[in-house]
Image (spheres, rainbow, N blue to C red):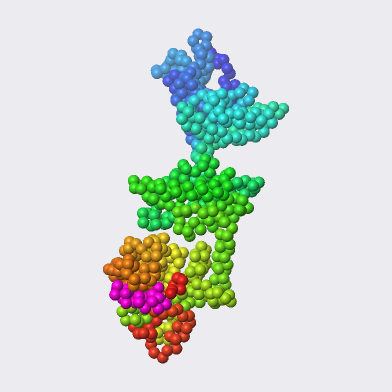
Amino acid sequence: MPAQPSVPAAVLDAISTPLLTTSEQGVVHWCNEAARHLGRLLGTDPDTLPFGAVTPDGPPVVVHRAAVDGTTRHLRVSCRRLPAGAGGEPTLTDPHQPPVGPDDRPGPPTTPLLYEFTDVTEQVGAERRADDYAWRLSHIEELARVGTWEWHLPTDQVVWSPTLKTMIGLAPETHLDYRTYRSMIHRDDLALVDAELDRAIREATSFTFTHRMSLPGGLQTRILRCYGEVFTDEAGRPLRMLGTAHDITEFRQVQDELAYLAAHDPLTGLPNRRALTARMSDLTAAGSGATTALLLLDIDNFKDINDLRGHAVGDEVLRLLARLLTEHLPAEAVLGRLGGDEFAVLLPDCDADRALAIGAGLCDLVARTPLAVRGEPLRVTLSIGAAPLDTADDDTLLLAHADLALYQAKGEGRNRARLFAPEQQEVAAQRVHVVSRVRRALETGQLQLDAQPIIDLPDDRIHSYELLMRVRDEQRRQIGPGEFLPALERGDMIYELDRWVVETATQALASARTAGAELRFDVNISSRSMEDPTFGDWVVATLTGAGVPATQLGLEITETTAIANLDAARHLASTLTSAGCRFSLDDFGAGYGSFVYLKHLPFNTVKIAGEFVRQADHGGSDPILIDAVVRAAHGLGMRTVAEHIDRPELVPVLRDLGVDRGQGYHLGRPEPLRTLMARTTTTDRTITTDGNDSAAATVSCAAPQS
């Protein structure tokens, strides 16, 4: 009689865990109802359930199979050998299916294998979701450079995220406790970190702090900004602390650089205008009779360096000069760069006399110290204005006073220091009054143009007219451009004035053409308009709009104006001459008298300064210099005009020297443009530029010539 199973089959058939037994050869002997249900779920017989992948008495194996409903089921399969019963018979057999041998006779008894199946689909899904979340969290931490940590307070155990360990230079698998972490914090930041964490634990609240972290080896430091919160149990006792650590090293570096640039000049590293004015504001606000002075420094003729040697050389000059000044200023002085070629020095505890002496010493130092630029010595000079704080009650006024003193130093010949005096402010007030007077005259039509003829010396015929500006208002004394132009060029009104002159000249040319006369006007413009890159195109467009040929208008710039910005002069000359306008160099010799500028600028005419003309009939060096200018100009295809011819004896001398044209009181005094236009537009014949009454004109911003 076969042995009965030790566990009733009916009981095993009723449990929910799928079970089946096989021989060691894999022949299924028995399965319970749960196993048959699993087979139906997977669309297979119990004989083909995935039990072959597991090793008897080995670890469970998780396998996955497709279910008939289209889902994937994950099964954990375990296998163990059943113990033998008494007499070597198995303790669990199916009485209806005894073992059989190959000859259909009962074979020798074998040890059955019991397989157990557990559906772990939900568990696997939860684990995958947890893994995905951990993966996303890890990568988000890496992308945001944010690490996380959790501190279990009762056990003093801290768990650090792999990203945080990497941030502080450790491998993700490195064991790290809080004591080790704390040893890496910069010693100057330890007290802050400890105090903030103690407060958060004591008050069971959130916390934030920023600290430096020394990476292993001590050669690199990172900056971490930490945020976190303390969580308590039901009794309110601190239980754990959660925190994040953000690596803000690069952000802090950029922040520090921006803060530095906000207060420093990037070229020289000196405090900039903003920092200097803030310091001046502090000093003026403090009051209390503090003895403080301001020096305003300007490099003389700095634009020559930029134009002739290039801006790279100019930048090097600024750097070297900043270094030289820093080395020789008093230790308490604050040197800064206001912009361009202008520097400022704040001198605490310094009275007016000592400030002036320091300024004069700096002028002497710079003048006798060549700057080594690209291996070559380069000498520059300074003009300096000094102003004591006791003359001003705010930083704006203090700067204005120093600027007035600087203006005086420039006007007296440069390479010197001058101290602010109240009369300088009176001069400035007069300058403001003159500007207001010109503004009012321009708005009311009291700004007028006079015309002075320019004569062809070989045949004594009128070649052109120079138009001179005059303010004729209700005040008794009329003023000319020599009085108001220097003041106007310090502001933006000069742009408006230059354009008014061009427009007035263009309208006169158009009126003359309507009357059948051909006129030519030349307009002398300021350095500010010359530096306006749109001015040349505007002139050409104005002529075109009025129907006036460009050949009837010429523009003049003085030699000093051209030298101040060669690039701008070259651009304007190219724009005008390509359209057909004439372009003249005025007052040649009054500034530098360098033929280099004639070579590089496309002038049509060179006007010889009156300084060389007035005594040309007395011999000496003047005729020699005039002859040199004439030969150079003619060799470059240019014409010459001698200015300030005020005596008849000069005409034959200049004619013999080859000068083409002349201008001055002897050749013709200025007359109002309206008078010239009335005579021109009422004539009953056509006026040409070849006849005695031909009218070509030059509008000049120069003072009346005599």
Which quarter of the figure is the C terminus placed in?
bottom left
- Give percent across and percent down for residue 337: 49, 49
- Please identify the quarter of the rendering in which residue 696 is found: bottom left
Position of 629 with respect to 536 (left or right) is: left
Which range of residues does the magenta coloring cover?
644-666
Q: Is residue 14 magenta?
A: no
- Please identify the quarter of the rendering in which residue 234 is found: top right
How many numbered marks have been drawn onto this rendered protein structure? 0
- Give percent across and percent down for residue 636: 29, 68
Answer whether residue 130 is visible to the viewer in this image. no
Q: Residue at x 35, y 77 (%)?
A: 649
Position of 411 with respect to 663 (left or right) is: right
Answer whether residue 328 is visible to the viewer in this image. yes
Q: Residue furthest right?
A: 235
Query: Which residue is nearer to you in this view: 102 or 520?
Result: 520
- Give percent across and percent down for residue 683: 42, 89
Q: Residue at x 61, y 31 (%)?
A: 192
Magenta stretch: dominant SS? loop
Position of 432 with respect to 321 (left or right) is: right
Q: Residue at x 47, y 78 (%)?
A: 450
Q: Residue furthest bottom?
A: 684
Position of 303 with respect to 155 (left or right) is: left
Q: Residue at x 46, y 14 (%)?
A: 109
- Give percent across and percent down for residue 660: 32, 75
Q: Where is 253 relative to 105, above or below? A: below
Q: Where is 347 relative to 570, above or below? A: above
Q: Where is 60 relative to 681, above or below? A: above
Q: Residue furthest top?
A: 87
